[in-house]
Image (cartoon, rainbow, N blue to C red):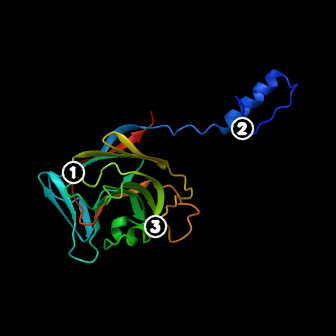
Amino acid sequence: MMVPGLHIKSGLPVFLITWFISGCALAVRPAAADELWNKGELLAEEDFSGDLSNWLAEGDVAANIEGGRLRFEALEKTEVKKGNIWWRKHFTGPLLIEYDYQSATPYGLSMIWWCAHGREGEDLLSFTRSGVYDEYVKGRMNGYHISYHRFDSGVSNLRKSYGFHKLSSNDDPIPIDELDLHHITIYCRQGHIRFIVDGKLVHDFIDRGQPCLEGKAWHHDYPCKGTGAVLTEGRIGIRHTQKQVAYYDNFRIYRLVKP
């Protein structure tokens, strides 16, 4: 094997040539993938068999229990036309999040948030938001979020706030006209994020605070020299826009444990 651009003077002993090339090959070999941890203790679950006292809705949305599932809808009663609903429980990683999702509309946009907390360390639910997106990505909070079933764009994005930082972008796993039931899994361990839909890996990203992606259409309002510290704790919530209606069920939060 020859290393591109490498020229070796003739007459060198074969063992030296072999040792030198092997050393170069090792130097350019990519780093090993992050070790995957296993599903451990069940920390919390929500099957929506009772009421919504464990959830807090904000913005121009409606939430209710219908047929033993959460029905969450972005309304058009105000100019906001969007909003979130937060699980009142606070979670500290590493975590594995699982839930079932089924859109009821062939349009709209759905998001899942986790590790959401106040930028100054305060509880996310100790201050209010109106549902306007800027309040979530440029306001008083930090968090990770992933968009999917995303208004016929064909794209799913993983972002980190504060800052509207795009960490990963890939094909949307749920086409806009897809109204079937889907099982979603989010793996989050010390910055390693994996987003899986029906067993298919969509995003696999390790957050080390590195500079974020820059797309042709979506840009940051300020230079992205780095995305900041890894986020490890906070609230879990979902967000709808564009008149999105969807059903959620069987939330399960597990501790990730080292194999």
On the rendered structure, is 41 left or right of 140? Answer: left
Residue flagged by tag 2: what amino acid is it?
Pro
Pinpoint residue 166: horizontal percent, then vertical percent.
47, 59
Tell me the kind of residue under disc 1. Answer: Leu
Q: Dot 1: within a 10 Å radius of its alpha carbon, few (fewer than 14), some, or many (20 or more) residues?
A: some
Per the image, label 3 sits on a secondary structure element best described as: loop
Q: Please, what secondary structure does the residue beneath circle 2 have?
A: loop
Q: Would residue 201 be found to the left or right of residue 53 on screen?
A: right
Quarter assignment of residue 121: bottom left
Of label 1 and label 3, which has the lower sequence position?
3
Graded by Cα atoms within 10 Å as few (under 14), some (14 to 19) or many (20 or more), the crowding at tag 2 reads: few
The amino acid on which the numbered mark 3 sits, given as a three-letter code, is Arg
Mark 1 or mark 3: which is in front?
Answer: 1
| Among the two numbered marks 2 and 1 on one chain, the one whose residue lies closer to the N terminus | 2
Q: CA distance from mark 3 to mark 2?
A: 47 Å
Residue assigned mark 2: 4
Query: Residue 160, position in %: x, y?
Result: 45, 60
Q: Which residue is mark 3?
A: 119
Could you say where residue 107 lies in the image, as x and y percent from the top left? 25, 60
